[in-house]
Amino acid sequence: MTVAAPDPAGRFEQSLFIAAKPADVFACFFDHAALQEWWQALHAVVTPVPFGVYAIEWAPTSYRDDLLGPLGGVFHGTIVDVRPARQFLVADCWWVPPEGDPLGPMALHVSCQPEGDGCRLVVRQDGYEPSPRWRRYYAVVSRGWQLSLTALRRKAEAIGHERHRASSARGAAPERPAEDNGKGRGEETE
């Protein structure tokens, strides 16, 4: 996993190879069960359409960070661009902690590009105010992304293995994920 440390301009980016189809990785950001598994989401409202909601809630942590207080809370924003099975951009994002003032606005960009027998996932978060609280937020969130993206990798690769096993058991070609048919919502064509 390639991890760029938070920079003074208020941005960090994490990249990793996942041995899964880009559509399977992309789906992990919009499937409630997957979000619970890899991101420990308590609740999620995620709508992969332009102007859709992207909101994730985590349980408050039992420990307190010196600057941020308990972690968890809600991260929410508005999806302003979505290219099914490839990438999405969430703008006007805010983290609302269990205690204290929200941090934002931010942007979250997720890209799943084909690479070899899998895909290259890149997660980038932008937004910053020059303060100790923002610097601490990025330090904590960067580590959180590293752990969560490792779990996402396991989940996405397991989806591909399950699909392969199921298709092998039926004696059929592996099932293909829904592709974008030009409507912008990833529906399958007839």
Image: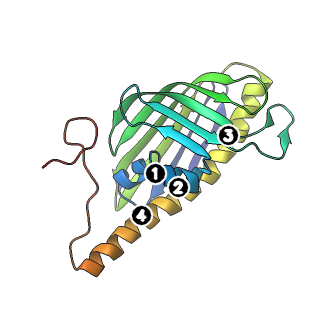
Quick check: marks 2 and 1 in contact, CB under 8 Å? yes
Disc nearer the start of the sequence (4/1): 1
Helix, strand or loop at disc 3?
helix
- Reply above or below: 30 against 8: below
Residue occupied by mark 1: 28
Q: Which mark is residue 152?
A: 2
Query: Of label 3 and label 2, which has the lower sequence position?
Result: 3
Amino acid, disc 2: Leu
Contact flag, marks 3 and 1 (Cβ < 8 Å): no
**x then y, percent, for residue 42:** 62, 47
Label 2 to label 1: alpha-carbon separation? 7 Å
Check disc 3 and give the amino acid type.
Val
Q: Which mark is residue 141?
A: 3
Q: Quadrant of residue 66?
A: top right
Point out which mark residue 159 bears.
Answer: 4
**Label 2: few (<14), some or many (≥20) within 10 Å?**
many
- Mark 2 and mark 4 in contact? Answer it, CB < 8 Å: no
CA–CA distance in space, label 2 to label 4:
11 Å
Proximity of marks 4 and 1: CB atoms separated by less than 8 Å: yes
Looking at the rendered image, the disc whose residue lies closer to the viewer, 3 or 1, is 1
Q: Earlier in the sequence, mark 3 or mark 1?
A: 1
